[in-house]
Image: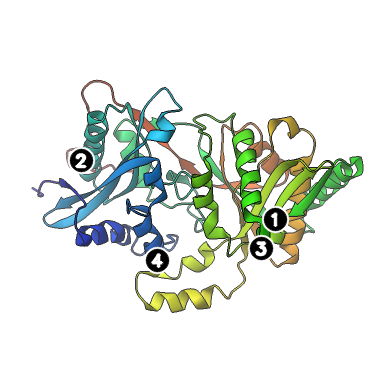
């Protein structure tokens, strides 16, 4: 009989290192995994430096068995988000686990007890203290590595979540891919549509002005809070959280590929940012785990990425049927192709979004990855689902 699983909090520096580096055990030999940057992960879990701790509290735990780590989880309470919704979510993240349901069950039991002790109603996630970076469980799409800000998980994570009683919290999150060959029929059709919109007048597309960063961030915040308000579980974006999200891209963004749409009167009505897909470089630098990995990063960053990561298209509802999105897509596709990009990642958008999936598919994009965020309501005694005698979920 195997030793019992013990869940212990991360307290010492050595335990923090074990927590942060545990994923290397899970993904060893997986050619699709893009290791997270350890310096950034260390900052994210540090209450003195992590952006999440401005809005909530979090604790980190390791599952131990026989003196060896076999899983990790983070339990968090986002006070700001919970203040804007009726149900009080207990956010879970940094979930990594060996392929044994007994370990996953122990981690989930501990998270459920942690949330219940704080009067929270649910377990919600996985989110790694960031609602935009590498969230959810990968459900479909294991033919290529993830693009920037998208995650990668083993197939058995889905089975573990669902065996424990988690249900989809919302529609699946979709990553689309689109070919940027200007001769491709979908892009030619897009160009014709955009030309008709230009002929009607009323809108113009401009590149980002990074010299006036604060003003541009203010425009993005306004658009996000108006363009996304219709989505389930939407919580308004606050300035500090948005700045923390955008700041890492300020030095790497090509302003000619970060586009705004404006009316003739100068009102901002659209935002469409394209960022070089840095995961093409990061997949080969081992998360900067060792000093020599920095030299690898320097060499890889000198290469032209083949793909462009487009993380959002923001158009307020009152401008949905005006052709603004078509103008932005066409302009970015032409600029990206001219700079040598071969394809673009459009991610992530919810299947519940009434506009973006339809628009993407009309422009010739196809879903190449699907991620799922889960929620489990904590009502009454916690009764995890029973599995096979060896506690292992099999395909």
Label 2, residues with CA under 10 Å away: few <14, some 14-19, many ≥20: some
Foreground label between 3 and 1: 1
Residue drawn 70% across the image and 67% down it: 340
Q: State the separation of the CA atoms marked 2 and 4.
A: 28 Å
Lower position in the chain sequence, tag 1 or tag 2: 2
Lower position in the chain sequence, tag 3 or tag 4: 3
Label 1, residues with CA under 10 Å away: few <14, some 14-19, many ≥20: many
Label 4, residues with CA under 10 Å away: few <14, some 14-19, many ≥20: many
Q: Which residue is mark 2?
A: 106
Q: Is residue 90 left or right of residue 330?
A: left
Residue 86, x across and y down, in percent: 42, 22
Q: Which residue is mark 3?
A: 254
Lower position in the chain sequence, tag 3 or tag 1: 1
Q: Is residue 104 left or right of residue 203?
A: left
Q: Is residue 60 left or right of residue 324?
A: left
Foreground label between 1 and 2: 1
Asked whether the viewer can see residue 152, the reply is yes
Q: Which residue is mark 1?
A: 208
Q: State the separation of the CA atoms marked 1 and 2.
A: 48 Å
Residue 262, x across and y down, in percent: 77, 44
Q: Which residue is mark 4?
A: 287
Q: Could you tell me which secondary element the residue under label 1 belongs to?
A: loop
């Amino acid at each position: 009989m195997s030793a019992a699983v013990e869940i212990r909090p991360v307290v010492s520096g050595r335990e923090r290192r074990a927590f942060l580096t545990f994923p290397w055990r899970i993904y060893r030999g997986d050619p699709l995994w893009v290791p997270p940057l350890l310096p950034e992960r260390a900052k994210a879990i540090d209450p003195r430096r992590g952006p999440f701790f401005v809005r909530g509290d979090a604790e980190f735990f390791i599952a131990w068995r026989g003196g060896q780590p076999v899983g990790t989880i983070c339990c968090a309470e986002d006070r700001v988000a919970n203040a804007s919704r009726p149900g009080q979510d207990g956010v879970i993240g940094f979930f990594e686990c060996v392929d044994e349901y007994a370990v996953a069950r122990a981690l989930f039991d501990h998270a459920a007890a942690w949330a219940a002790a704080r009067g929270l109603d649910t377990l919600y996630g996985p989110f790694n203290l960031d609602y935009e970076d590498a969230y959810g469980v990968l459900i479909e799409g294991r033919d290529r590595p993830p693009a920037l800000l998208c995650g990668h998980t083993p197939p058995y994570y889905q089975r573990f979540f669902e065996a424990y009683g988690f249900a989809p919290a919302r529609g699946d999150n979709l990553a689309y891919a689109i070919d940027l060959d200007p001769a491709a029929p979908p892009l030619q059709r897009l160009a014709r549509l955009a030309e008709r919109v230009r002929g009607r007048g009323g809108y113009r597309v401009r590149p980002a002005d990074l010299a006036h960063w604060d003003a541009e961030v203010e425009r993005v915040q306004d658009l996000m809070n108006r363009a996304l308000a219709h989505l389930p579980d939407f919580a308004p974006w606050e300035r500090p959280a948005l700045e923390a999200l955008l700041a890492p891209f300020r030095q790497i963004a090509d302003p000619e590929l970060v586009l705004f749409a404006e009316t003739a009167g100068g009102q901002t009505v659209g935002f469409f940012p394209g960022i070089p897909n840095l995961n093409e470089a990061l997949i080969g630098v081992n998360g900067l785990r060792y000093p020599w990995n920095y030299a690898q990063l320097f060499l890889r960053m000198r290469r032209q990425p083949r793909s462009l990561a487009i993380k959002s298209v923001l158009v307020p509802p009152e401008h949905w049927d005006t052709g603004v999105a078509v103008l932005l897509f066409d302009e970015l596709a032409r600029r990206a192709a001219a700079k040598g990009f071969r394809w673009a990642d459009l991610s992530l958008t919810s299947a519940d979004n009434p506009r973006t999936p339809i628009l993407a598919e009309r422009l010739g994009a196809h879903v190449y990855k699907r991620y799922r965020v889960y929620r489990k309501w904590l009502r009454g005694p916690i009764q995890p689902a029973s599995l096979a005698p060896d506690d292992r979920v099999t395909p």
